[in-house]
Amino acid sequence: MAMKTLLRLWATFATLLLAVPALAQAPAGYAYYEIGDVAAPTPAPTAQAMMLMGGGEWDVGAFRWFAERAGHGHIVVLRASGAGEAGEEIYRDIGGVLSVQTIVFTDRAAASDPRVLAILEHADGIFLAGGDQSNYVRYWKNTPVARLLDAHVRKDRPIGGTSAGLAILGGTAYGAMDGGSIDSPTALADPAGPAVTLVTDFLHMPRLAHVVTDTHFNARDRLGRLIAFLAAARQKDAVAIGIGVDEQSALCVEADGTARLRTRNGGFAWLVQPKNRPALKPGKPLDWASVRVTGIGPDSRFDLNSLRIIAPVFAGTARVAGGRLLDAPATPGAVLPQ
């Protein structure tokens, strides 16, 4: 009797040993975090919307607007670095949502993982975190994840992105594919060079097909580099324009294309509209005679359909000569590069 009991115990132990590798095996290419009740029904209708954030500290009002457009339901955070801390902040500090699930991608395999795709299908709102946008391009371009991000917005659900997450939302995106983050003087010195790594046919957001976005805008003197990106983009897209967003600020776009800026530090969004298409040669600096720059503040109203701004904060026409940005419009409280 004792021998039979011992044999049963050994059999049970062996079964457990065989099961341990399967239980301990991590999912392919991603880490997963959740907080809240992911199974609860969404309490209100969702609405198509875009939250275009410039990086840095979040504006709480913008996130509460985003939560409302998500029906106060289920938010999914996508990123390629860090962990679940952004989800914790959204759920605990901002509130107004039932759950937040975070997927941290570590390779391209995750973009075809059935669990990942099911989570995205279920999302009421999707937020693309900051980090290195080249990872987003490598992991998501031409994958089911990219197709689901496009489909998410078509289903009248909001999407948001900050820093790297905003960089990839435009129809032409700066992919930072060379492993760096180019600055304005370098980009203006050679806009046709190998460091201006623009990516097209990635994501397809409403009214952003001809838009190049940029972030951390005034804090990192990025007007010059956005103009350089537009010079390169206009070689293929003759009507490309730019939208830059300052840190701690968010351009919140409604379903009808109207937008307003929310900011916690007096920042702006920048509408950059060049005239014509410049001639570019690799290794040569940019010359461009006319680039209209208009500032969008909290009291402004912006229509992405017509590109009309009511009550702009500043406006002017910049030019670039020999790779040097000249005549940039003065912004209230800002110190512009010389």
Image (spheres, rainbow, N blue to C red):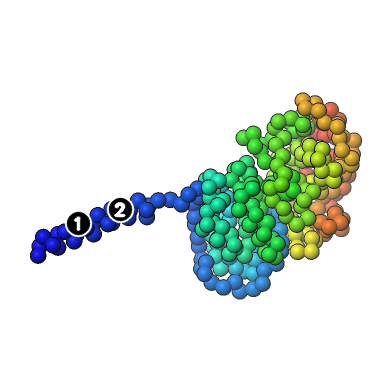
Spatial CA distance of label 1 from label 2 is 12 Å
Question: Is residue 46 in view?
Answer: yes
Callout 1 crowding tier (Cα within 10 Å): few <14, some 14–19, many ≥20: few
Figure quadrant of the N terminus? bottom left
Image height check: is 41 above or below 243?
below
Q: Which disc, if any, is residue 10? A: 1
Question: Could you say which disc has been placed on residue 30 in the image?
Answer: none
Please state the horizontal and vertical placement of residue 252, each as a whole percent of the image. Answer: 73, 59
Q: Is residue 118 left or right of residue 265?
A: left
In percent of width and height, residue 101 lies at: 54, 59
Say whether residue 87 is visible: no
**Which quarter of the image is occupied by the C terminus?**
top right
Which type of secondary structure does the marked residue at label 1 adopt? helix
As drawn, is 247 to the left or to the right of 332? Answer: left
Residue 18: numbered disc:
2
Q: Within the image, what quadrant is residue 253 found in?
A: bottom right
Residue sitting at 62 percent across and 41 percent down?
A: 134
